Amino acid sequence: MAQEKRQIIETYLSEVGATLGKLPVDMAAQVVELIETARANGKRVFTFGNGGSAATASHFASDLSKGAISQGKPRIGAFALTDNVPLLSAWANDTAYESIFAEQLENLVETGDVAIGISGSGNSQNVLNGVKVAKSKGASTIGFIGFDGGKLKSLVDLAIIVPNHNMEQVEDIHLLLAHIITTCLRK
């Protein structure tokens, strides 16, 4: 039994390693540049997603707000649209779950802000709707996506697609990308 578990672990790590070698490094650098521009112009960053991607959105906003502090540069105003449960449930109940991010962005997003939609499949309707509102208001839009990119890849200004069809591994790598981007912003 222990050997079987060991094989599962080794396979998982091997698959993640192979996927890491295929990541679009230039795209990650472009995300850093978009956020740096927003920072310099006093604009904000909004992150959002569902399930594990909601956890990544929350973690990324926290890291951008605190972990990206760099002496001599303005701080980044970053907000996870996943963190206000009463507001999320109100929009879901009073309109539709598909509107939970779009309705929040209607109130908040401005030209020059950055909106980062995180979706393993790239097909989460509430993420797609949030990106559409952000674009309509003049925000730069970024997708952290997995699988083949889904509908989100052609909707955002910049799509970082993790070329993997295992949701857990896609989510692992999305968080790794968030940490890499935060590290670049802190330097």
Image: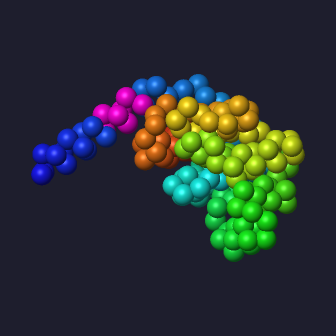
Which residue is at 76% across, 49% downward? Answer: 129
Front-most of residues 184 and 130: 130
Q: Nearer the viewer, residue 99 or 86?
A: 99
The picture quadrant where one finds residue 10 is: top left
Q: Residue at x 35, y 34 (%)?
A: 15
Locate residue 110, reporting x and y percent.
85, 49
The reply to whether residue 176 is in sight is: no
Prevailing secondary structure class for the magenta stretch in the rendered image: helix
- Residue 66 appears left or right of 154: left
Q: Which quadrant is home to the C terminus?
A: top right
Scheme of colours in the image: rainbow
Q: Does 56 sit left or right of 3 as displayed?
A: right
> Residue at horizontal 59%, vertical 55%?
50
Q: Is residue 64 magenta?
A: no
Using the image, determine if residue 147 lies above or below residue 21: below
In x, y percent, where is residue 86?
69, 74
Span shown in magenta = 13-19
> Which image quarter: residue 96?
bottom right
Relative to the observer, which residue lies in front, 74 or 27?
A: 27
* Residue 168 image position (x, y, % from top left): 43, 47
**10 w.r.t. 5: above or below:** above
Residue 35: x %, y % from top left: 69, 41
* Residue positioned 79% across, 65% down in the render: 95
